[in-house]
């Protein structure tokens, strides 16, 4: 894949909504699984990541992130958090759709549109997983979307069930025959 149309971001947002919208009545002030953030804070982190990716692409940033932070009003509901994520994700999908095939933008190196899309899909999947753990929901990321993230961002990942491998590669699970991952980074930059 050398260019993207944002469709994977859109489908990952649909997956996230199908899992988390039924839980908007839950307590989103609890920790999101193993993270130090609450479920609401984790949702804001996802929205901010998606918005920052979109901004990086739109201005063709070459050496750093644009200097802004996304803040959520303290009285925001879980449904509003999810709406914010969807809004930022749609902005990113639009930016991906309009990006030239040779576009590069900074994310700890110069990444192409496929790198930004894979990072967005990864952010949404992994933090949806974290939030479900905090809320006590059983859910694993879909195989096809995990495969996309692994192929683009973790090219040296071992074979196996894509969800299990992605969770292991990001320090969220064990993988038989492999040591636990305590530090990781995905390869978004194009070499």
Image (cartoon, rainbow, N blue to C red):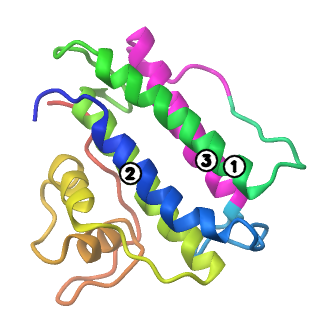
- Tell me if label 3 and label 2 are in contact, CB under 8 Å: no
Are discs 1 and 3 less than 8 Å apart at CB? no
The spot of residue 121 in percent (x, y) is: 36, 48
Q: Are marks 1 and 2 in contact (CB under 8 Å)?
A: no
User: Which quarter of the picture shows residue 83?
Assistant: top right
Q: Is residue 123 in sight in this rendering? A: no
Asked if residue 38 lies left or right of residue 157, the reply is: right
Magenta-colored span: 40-68
Along the polypeptide, which appears first: circle 1 or circle 2? 2
- The front one of 67 and 150 is 150
**Residue 128 in picture, x, y percent from top left:** 50, 63
Q: Is residue 46 above or below residue 132?
A: above
Q: Which residue is mark 1?
A: 81
| Residue located at (44% from left, 62% from top) | 126
Residue at x 43%, y 52% (from the top left corner): 14
Secondary structure mostly seen in magenta is helix
Given residues 41 and 154, the one toward you in this image is: 41
The residues bearing labels 1 and 3 have C-alpha atoms spaced at a distance of: 10 Å
- The residue tagged with tag 3: helix, strand or loop? helix
Question: Which residue bears the numbered disc 3?
Answer: 45
The residue to which callout 2 is attached is 12
Determine if the magenta segment contains residue 44. yes
**Structural crowding at the residue carrying mark 2, measured as other residues with C-alpha within 10 Å and reported as few (<14), some (14–19) or many (≥20):** many
Mark 3 and mark 2: span between their CA atoms? 16 Å
């Amino acid at each position: 894949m050398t260019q993207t149309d944002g469709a994977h971001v859109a489908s990952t947002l649909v997956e996230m909504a199908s899992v988390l919208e039924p839980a908007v009545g839950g307590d989103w002030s609890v920790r999101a699984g193993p993270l130090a953030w609450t479920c609401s804070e984790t949702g804001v982190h996802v929205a901010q990541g998606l918005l920052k990716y979109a901004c990086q692409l739109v201005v063709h940033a070459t050496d750093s992130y644009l200097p802004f932070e996304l803040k959520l009003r303290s009285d925001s509901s879980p449904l509003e958090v999810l709406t914010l994520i969807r809004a930022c994700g749609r902005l990113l999908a639009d930016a991906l759709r309009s990006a030239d095939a040779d576009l590069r933008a900074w994310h700890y190196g110069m990444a192409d549109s496929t790198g930004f899309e894979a990072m967005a899909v990864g952010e949404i999947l992994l933090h949806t997983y974290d939030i479900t753990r905090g809320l006590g929901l059983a859910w694993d990321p879909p195989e096809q979307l995990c495969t996309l993230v692994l192929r683009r961002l973790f090219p040296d990942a071992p074979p196996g069930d894509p969800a299990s491998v992605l969770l292991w590669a990001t320090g969220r699970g064990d993988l038989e025959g492999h040591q636990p991952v305590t530090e990781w980074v995905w390869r978004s930059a194009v070499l």
